[in-house]
Amino acid sequence: MAKQVAKKSPSIGKTSAKGLAKAEWLLIKGGSIFTASESFSGDILINRGKICAVGENLDFGGPAEIIDAKGLEVYPGGVDAHTHFSLPFMGTVSADDFETGTKAAACGGTTTIIDFAIPARGQNVSKAVEAWHQKAQGKAVVDYGFHVALVEANEKVLAEIPKLVKDGITSFKCFLAYKEALMIDDAQFLEVLFAAKKHKALVSVHAENGDMLSWLMKKLTDAGKTGPQYHPVAHPALAEGEATHRAIVLAKMAEVPLYIVHMSCYEALQEVISARLSGQMVFAETCPQYLLLSDELYQKSGFEPAKWVMSPPLRHVSNQQPLWEGLSDGFIQTVATDHCSFRFKGQKDMGKGNFLKIPNGIPAVGDRINLLYTYGVTQGRMTRNQFAAAIATNPAKLFGLYPRKGSIVPGADADLVIIDPKKKGKISAKTTHHNVDYSAFEGFELKGLPVYVISRGDLIAKDDKFIGGSGRGVYLKRKTFDPGEWGVQKG
Ligand SMILES: [Zn+2]
């Protein structure tokens, strides 16, 4: 990387709007810096929340706060493109709100989240978005954007798309599962794809065949098979493979890019690989749970398996290796969490006696970077550059936040996660920042932990402690999807 030095001369720290003394200049010295495309040793100079220079031995004459990053690794701050904070779902509300959820995110090295505003059927979509703004504003401690889920695709709903895109909501999710709740049919999905094409928005899809799932659920419960261990039986990998294939075909017909959320299995990955090899712009996201946990957990006794009831469910362990390879081969671009936490006591147990009533989801937003670093980077499954791409750069590029987020270049927001590769830890419900009474990754050993997390130049977390201001996160108006970021000409 070419040396880029600050041109402006530094000034002495002033008092910030909140009345707290705050250095205007922050210098991160001597770290090993990794981006999606480069690795180098150097310094990063930050002024008023923005990166203003990156280079070796930055000559800085004035007063600055200095973080000594010798022996540490510096990455772009994490971008988790899939969270559900304060989501009303299955008769309850997800346990982490924008405050607890983003604090956990921050401690784990994630400095941007994109949550899903999900309207009820018949509800004005912009009303739902307004409700999500209310949930987040003044509570989120990291920056945030919103996707919108379209749970119906009638004229009224589609007419709202241009205004939503103008307001920075440039991606729309459709569910091919959750029949009679969130699911839309193929004709409606096509309506969304064509509307998105017109307004340059990116469509994402929850790909499971909702009819197959409903049929299986009925067969199982009619036969008295109502325990939590039957949840994965009602969500076979075949149903995900089929819906992934169908979504890809429909997107091909509409000639639009497609993003597959929370891909969990080989059946779906195969569809993505063959679409990409044929030149179709299909992107995929997976999650730490699908890389590291398997369906053996559903064999635990009693109601315990409910902790991992999520859709798609955990798969057979044989799916993990292909997903890791998909990540390192570039067929899977992002690792998000689908964080949707429910307390084991008081929420998950709503489904005691009927697995269909167990709120779906797990806590993960604070664990994502730790897990991917330990089990991806240190175990040689991905390079440090691929890690930077998966946790930050690719989601920022896909969802219209790049280069403001997901990059370490002058002009970008100073969002950084600084990892001590030697530091060890262990995941436990006792130490988690998630607002729940269990951990989905209990006992997982970690090697390489975030020691400093910086958001817009503020040191917001240090050694797993949140030390930032309350409600400091800002709403991110996202740009529309840019195919040029993926080597495809515009137009
Ligand atoms: Zn989700």
Image (cartoon, rainbow, N blue to C red):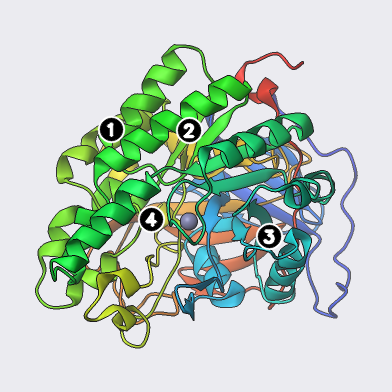
Residue at the disc numbered 4: 370
- Judged by depth in the image, the label closer to the viewer, 3 or 2, is 2
Q: Amino acid at mark 2?
A: Ala
In this rendering, the answer to whether 99 lies above or below 181 is: below
- Judged by depth in the image, the label closer to the viewer, 2 or 4, is 2
Residue 247's disc is: 2
Residue at the disc numbered 3: 143
Asked whether, in this view, residue 422 is left or right of residue 52, the answer is left
Badge 2 or badge 4: first in the primary sequence: 2
How busy is the neighbourhood of tag 2: few (under 14 within 10 Å), some, or many (20 plus)?
many
Spatial separation of the CA atoms under disc 2 and disc 4 = 32 Å
> Mark 4 touching mark 3, by CB under 8 A?
no
Tag 2 secondary structure: helix
> Mark 1 touching mark 4, by CB under 8 A?
no
Most foreground residue, 252 or 107: 252
Spatial separation of the CA atoms under disc 1 and disc 4 = 27 Å
Residue 293, image x, y percentages: 23, 54
Asked whether, in this view, residue 200 is left or right of residue 98, the answer is right
In this rendering, the answer to whether 33 lies above or below 1 is: below
Q: Amino acid at mark 3?
A: Asp
Q: Amino acid at mark 4?
A: Asn
Residue 267's disc is: 1
Spatial separation of the CA atoms under disc 3 and disc 2 = 31 Å
Residue 488, image x, y percentages: 65, 15
How busy is the neighbourhood of tag 4: few (under 14 within 10 Å), some, or many (20 plus)?
many
Identify the residue at horizontal 80%, vertical 50% (top origin).
160
Tag 4 secondary structure: helix
User: Where does the C terminus fall, quadrant-wise?
Assistant: top right
> Mark 2 touching mark 4, by CB under 8 A?
no
Spatial separation of the CA atoms under disc 1 and disc 3 = 35 Å
